[in-house]
Image (tube, grey):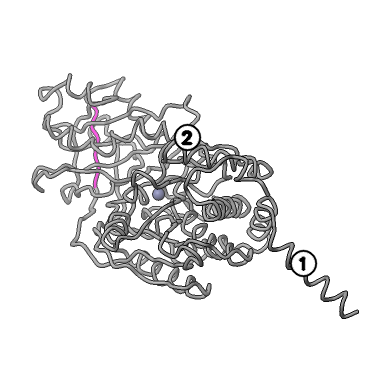
Amino acid sequence: MKRILLFLILISSSISFSQTDQEVLKTIYTQSLTNGKSYDWLSHLSNQIGSRLSGSLGAERAVAYTKEELDKLGLDKVWLQPVMVPKWVRGAKEFAFIETKPGKTTNVNICALGGSVATPALGLKAEVVEVQNFEELEALGTENIKGKIVFYNRPMQADLIQTFEAYGGCVNQRYKGAVEAIKFGAVGVIVRSMNLRMDDLPHTGSMTYDNLPVDKRIPSAAISTNDAELLSTMLKLDKSIKFYFKQSCKQLKDVQSYNVIGEITGSEFPNEYMIVGGHLDSWDLGDGSHDDGAGVVQSMDVLRLLKESGITPKRSIRVVLFMNEENGLRGGKKYAAIAKQKNENHVFALESDSGGFTPRGFSFDCTDAAFNQVLSWQQLFKPYLIHYFEKGGSGADVGPLKTESNVLAGLRPDSQRYFDHHHASNDTFDAINKRELELGAATMTSLIYLFDKYGVNPISNKEAIKD
Ligand SMILES: [Zn+2]
């Protein structure tokens, strides 16, 4: 009897030793879907803490909460990395209307763009010039623009399947709209929200004045897609209608904040670092569940899932929760600067900052040789309907870590509904699906596992999936 027992123990331990990659991935996905923590963590971040704009109380509480939760995971190290961040506050809710005749007004939905100055205390009222792009603006010139509000109304392109491409094709209106309009004497800027859907929610996001002195800056706001259409239609009927808006946002002094970092130290190559992360800050209108609460909790769960699945990483795996991606990228820059200073070799970095929707795959910023290696793992993901493996960008926060030889990657979830919520008041916990979130965490963990097992150097396809 004893002998049989010993035999069984030997068999079971040898099975766990020679687990195939297929089996390991199955364990990781099972763990995430039956025993995942990401959804609970996100519930706390979203529902108990709420929005986490850099420098806000929410951001401070999120730092403390995630540090505390990482402390509970029994990692080798957990620490806070100090970083100074900008602090911009929205102030009282914005108010806006279209005036067709004195006293005849229609209220519309706007929100100040992040970093914008306020309007005068009593608001700003002026005629409106609608343009689709900067070329049109230039063609109109100072004589048509001086003293008016510039209204950028180029919609996101609906026929692009990759919605991030549609976003990329439009976002210069939001980011650079003010600096361009200022050149021609505009007094304010209204931008159509970066949203593929027609609805009443304005979407905020960062904008810049470059280095213009404060007295040259003009207030800038986003308008909902429905109200952008309304304003455009009314302008077609009568060019002399006026637009009024009032906002009281403010840029305050930089404040102290932190990146939150946890580490499992590598058993064989402790000086080779692989990181997984998302950004802890969020815009202030919703609670940042998709952008980027999802990426934060998924990244935290990667380290936990590795442990729960009985994986001992050879390399050091870090989770990095970056501060201030939305309006400064100070956390991402700081992390990379310190890594460089300490001569830390970051061989791989994975970011999740595209929402918590069903994962489809990854995009990779790497050499062709490294990419071929990645492609050799593709069939391991087939059972989980993960099929998108493309070369392309990774993520804003891990971008500064790029070297000639390392691999950066971004999780690519389904993006069709992402911009319904992005930077708007409906980026909230109810828009998150538990299973989709957990599938994302498992998909990320699986990629980390494979990169850790095989390293980032190209190896033959055969070798990669031999077991
Ligand atoms: Zn984000």
**Residue nearer the viewer, 220 or 17:** 17
The disc label shown at residue 157, or none: none
Q: On the rendered structure, is 339 left or right of 377?
A: left
Residue, x 38% and y 37% (percent of image)? 194
**Is residue 432 among what the camera can see?**
no
Q: Nearer the viewer, mark 2 or mark 1?
A: 1
| Vertical order, 182 against 436 (above or below) | above
* Circles 2, 1 touching at the beta carbon (< 8 Å): no
Residue type beneath disc 2? Arg
Residue 340 on image: x %, y %: 28, 58
Residue type beneath disc 1? Ser
**Residue nearer the viewer, 24 or 214:** 24
Q: Please state, as top left, top right, bottom left or bottom right, where the N terminus lies in the image.
A: bottom right
Q: Quadrant of residue 263?
A: bottom left
User: Neighbour class for label 1 at 10 Å: few (<14), some, many (≥20)?
Assistant: few
Magenta span contains residue 101 = no
Q: Quadrant of residue 313?
A: bottom right
Q: Which residues are magenta?
A: 241-246
**Is residue 206 among what the camera can see?**
yes
On the image, numbered disc 2 is attached to which residue? 197
The disc label shown at residue 12, or none: 1
